Image: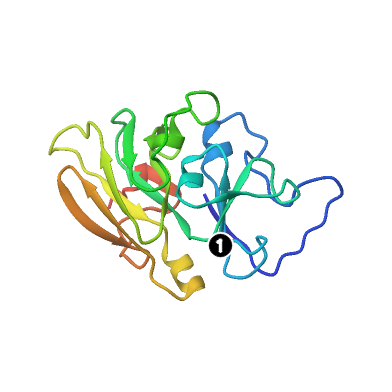
Amino acid sequence: SQRFQEGTARCRAQQPRLAFGANSGVAEAAVLPVFVTKDSSLGGFRSVVSSHLNGFAEAGCVLIDSAWAKDALGCDASLRRLNLWGADAGVLKLMGPGFNVNPDMSFPAEGRNAGEVKYDRVRMGYGSLVLVGQDYELTGSFGGPDRSWIVEFSDPVLGDYFGADGVINLRVGGQACQLRESDDRSFICEMGEFGGQCDF
């Protein structure tokens, strides 16, 4: 999930300001959330991500003080969510900045640090994080031309909040495309219901 905050000054004795995992044993909850802001409410960083995604340290993010978050990286660059809605096609591979490290197969990373993208049976789709303005490639067994897929980058709310239309370049199945936060989403159901694809 993408969470943004602004002008926040939370104080709790002996506890970090941010937390990953939502008291859940689900690996995605400990690894995939990202906190974003345009002010100084994240200690001067634009994004904060779990340190289990250690490839982002190779892309310029740094470990932050444990008063901010346990096991987190602070990034001057902007990170956003990349979703792929469709049927389960096994583990996919996302290549590009943030994923150029050896896979950590222990819980909760389970290879996500090196770009392994696993199917979420609850939301009926895939999700990962990407750096805004960068180039990525997604590979996997997509199951042939009869399968429908929707690729979604971030959302218009964040584009409006930051006053800029974030973009990434993505190559999938030999096809290159540019994805924007402002892209039309009228055909995507909220919260990934029906695998993100609405049944009209």
User: Of helix, strand and loop, which one carries label 1?
Assistant: loop
Q: Quadrant of residue 178?
A: bottom left
Q: Position of residue 118 (x, y in %)?
A: 39, 32
Q: Residue at 57% across / 69% down in the picture?
A: 38
The answer to which of 194 and 98 lies nearer the viewer is: 98
Q: Which residue is mark 1?
A: 46
Q: Residues within 10 Å of mark 1 (few under 14, many from 20)?
A: many
Q: Residue at x 30, y 40 (%)?
A: 86
Count of numbered marks: 1
Camera-nearest residue between 163 and 99 = 99
Q: Is residue 88 left or right of residue 2?
A: left
Decide: is 118 above or below 9. Answer: above
| Relative depth, front residue between 139 and 192 | 139
Q: Position of residue 98 (x, y in %)?
A: 42, 45
In the picture as drawn, the residue positioned furthest to the left comes out as: 145
Q: Which quadrant holds residue 185?
A: bottom left
> Which residue: 53% across, 51% down?
61
Give the amino acid type for the residue marked by disc 1 in the picture: Arg
* Residue closest to the eye, 24 or 52: 52
Farthest residue, direction bottom: 163
Q: How is the image coloured?
A: rainbow
| Image position, residue 134 (x, y; %) | 34, 57
